[in-house]
Image (cartoon, grey):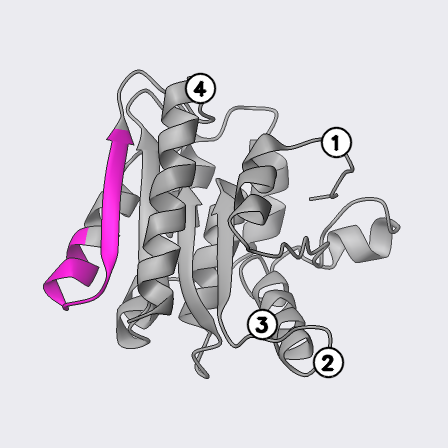
Amino acid sequence: MRTNNTLDFRKQSYLSAGFHIFDLEYTGTWGYGREYRTKLYGHWGDYDAKDVLAAITMLKNTSHVNTDKFFVMGSSAGAYLALCAIADDEQNLICAASVSASFYNPTDLVEKSCRYEKPYTEKLLGDEPRNDIAEKIVKNKAAVCFFHGSDDPVVSCDDARKLSESMKEAGLKTSFKLFDKEGHSFKDVDNISTMVDDTLEFFKRAAHQ
């Protein structure tokens, strides 16, 4: 998606806690011409995930960043991207992730998509959707905290819950929190505050493990 310069109090919370934020306009982002936007068709969760890992590698190699701890965050399609990046992170560049309204089986999402979104989602998915994400996340010993709304009409909480349970069984660092009466994007200020606080605590624990 296209980044913007509007005030985001969630980002301000992470900045105030000492984190730096790198907003990536990955392959498929609108605003750079049709070719760049449609390049992701059939490669959703592949080209954009490679962009994330390439960006982290670039940051590690620059003199402006003095850390080896990198975290990824995302919601909905952004959560799918974060999970794909972790799944493909064979060099363990990513320390941990925080995702909301997440899924790792995009085929189900296409089947449940509303009429006006389905054609675009099908183009992104292509003929050979990924089916290795959950397995590779466990294999890479990733750390992920999951947040979901109980009334999400777009994405079921099943994927997030199952993946968190699989990670827990493998002895990996994970958490799953279901917010009652929340939909696809969280509206309640207290729930948003809880998600930010829990994410900060999760990231800090992951960084010192």
Mark 2 and mark 1 lie on one chain; the one further toward the N terminus is 1
Mark 2 and mark 4 lie on one chain; the one further toward the N terminus is 2
Q: Identify the residue position indicated by label 4 in the image.
A: 189
Q: How crowded is mark 3: few (under 14 residues within 10 Å), some or many (20 or more)?
A: many
> What residue span does the magenta drawing correspond to?
165-178
Across and down, in percent, residue 29 comes to 74, 49
Across and down, in percent, residue 163 comes to 24, 54
Relative vertical location of residue 196 with respect to residue 134 in this rendering, above or below: above
Residue 3 appears in the rendering: yes
Which kind of residue does numbered mark 2 sit on? Ser
Disc 4 element: helix
Residue 192 relative to residue 147: left or right: right
Q: How far apart are marks 1 and 4 (CA)?
A: 18 Å
Mark 3 and mark 1 lie on one chain; the one further toward the N terminus is 1
Could you say which disc has been placed on residue 6 in the image?
1
Which kind of residue does numbered mark 3 sit on? Leu
Marks 2 & 4, CB-CB < 8 Å contact: no
Q: How far apart are marks 3 and 4 (CA)?
A: 32 Å
Between label 2 and label 1, give the one nearer the viewer: 2
In the rendered image, residue 209 lying in the magenta stretch gets the answer: no
